[in-house]
Amino acid sequence: MTKVDCDVVVVGAGFAGIYALWKAEQQGLSVRGFERASDVGGTWYWNAYPGARCDVASYNYAYFFNSDVVREWDWSDVCSRQGEIQQYLSFVAEKCDVTRLITFDTRVLTTTWSEEAGLWTVRTSGRETVVCRYLVLAVGALSEPKAPDIPGVDSFEGEAWFTSSWPRDSEVDLKGKRVGVIGTGSSGVQCVPEVAKVAREVVVFQRTANFVTPTLSGPMDPELVEELRADPEAVRNGLRKTYGGNQPLYIGSDRFSELDEEGREKALWHAWEQREVALAFWDSHLPDANAAISEFIRQRMHEVVNDPWTADQLVPWDHPYGGKRPCKSDVYLQTFNQPHVRLVSLRETPIEQIVSKGIVTSAEAFDLDVIIYATGFDALSGPVRALNITGIDGMAMNDQWADGPVNYLGTMVHGFPNLFLPSSAMSPSVLSNMATLAEQQIDFIFDKIRWLDEHGQARLHPTAESQEFWRDETLRYAKRVPGALTTDSWYNGANVPGKPRRYMVYRGGFSRYNDACYRELEEGFPGYEVLPGRAA
Ligand code: NA7
């Protein structure tokens, strides 16, 4: 009989992983955690580039399962910076006493299911082999950096840094240097203004312009903090009843379709001043409202950039608001008004190659001391694919996902019993509050485990029909979102050359998602195959 080392293995020590470790112990399960970084934090460990911060409000982007944590932690800003979020996660891990469960600096290399034993075998870079009953891959949605797909990357003789794995043990000194930044998603948008503060020259290489709107940054409202602290449990339950896992802001209460021109303009300005222009109308998600919001933001973006050519390039004319991940910054666009900051439009003059001295486009050679790659991630499915997962009958996850990820309710895959994937594809994931999602998914996962134990069952996995239904459901909701299927984006895999194109975010809303999960639990898992007999 195979020896079981622990009930649960949790891979990853970000929001979901930390909570999963705590939850396992609360449920009386033995658990071990593995984390490839040297500390907790997940995304907030690695993305330590200058300017990195969260664009979801701190008062919601936090745990609510532990009232002491809610009451003891003070956020310094509504939009927390990376360092503060990582400190918060360390604080929670210590407070919940889970750090001792984690083996750091250790990558999981392979995970293999034995149908006979009903167990998972996890092999790590530390040459350890751990056998467990349940495997929780809390590896995040944006943790597998996209390889830079530009010829000559290795020939550059200056310094090269990635925003997605910014060095933490040494200072990156950009003072007085000529710095090139490739990429203008959230990471590029956040780091360019910081780089411009110290560098002698900054050249920003932009392929696709993104929507950039003001942040919610500012001091926390003491009344709101009191409200959150009064009843964290109620906040927690309330967040799960919303569309995005955030407290609703009730900004635009009128329907776009029922307002005249003047009313629409007024609603747009009101929402803009509240720094949530996307919520200008009750029906902001409908195409006409979305088009008006998109146009309004384009005008606001255009008017803050002095040079007309640069302004034209920085405005996203080619996709509607929300087709790609919109960015938030109060200073990014204005940075291009500084004389030492220059934009290069790769649509007009593409990069031909990177050479020893810098970057060569079809029009010009740029000599640089430093290149910063803010080129993004193999998002959502990438971190799971990196783990070499083998399920029933030797089926590789990567083969099953050859045409794109499939799963049921964003957490389990047919043919991979007792394997759980929080934060992965086909959940509200990156279009919801990831902290709310982490708690909800981990609760759902451990509720499943409890249900199995209570019912004397050993394993479950979704049926093939359930996951086909869920794939279609995800597509059905994506079709309703302007630009979701027509814009190249990491939401649909288009950012990684060769990656199958499949919309990977469930847009039906958090509340509907939560209801669908708990309906399964209440009805005894009709969408799953449940197999009896305890594991070895
Ligand atoms: P993103 O949003 O994927 O942005 C990556 C950027 O890099 C984007 O502007 C890309 O242009 C650009 N890119 C990628 N590859 C290339 C090449 N080969 N040449 C030129 N430009 C390139 O990643 P971020 O890290 O900024 O943000 C990820 C998420 O983290 C963010 O949305 C938040 O949720 C937190 P493209 O748009 O593909 O034309």
Image (cartoon, rainbow, N blue to C red):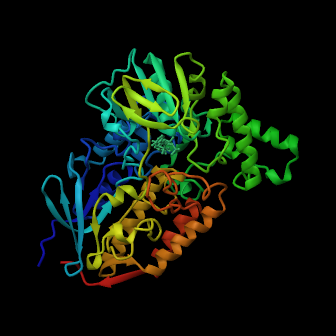
Above or below — where is 467 with respect to 152? below
Residue plotted at (36% across, 50% down): 144
Residue plotted at (65% across, 40% down): 276
Query: As drawn, is 224 to the left or to the right of 158?
Result: right
Residue plotted at (65% across, 58% down): 481
Above or below — where is 201 with respect to 162? above
Residue 409 picture location, percent across and down: 47, 68
Residue 122 seen in the current view: yes
Query: As drawn, is 178 to the left or to the right of 417?
Result: right
Please identify the quadrant where the C terminus is shown. bottom left
Query: As drawn, is 534 to the left or to the right of 432?
Result: left
Residue toward you, 206 or 480? 206
Residue 205 picture location, percent across and down: 50, 33
Q: How many marks?
A: 0
Residue toward you, 50 or 532? 50
Above or below — where is 55 with respect to 501? above
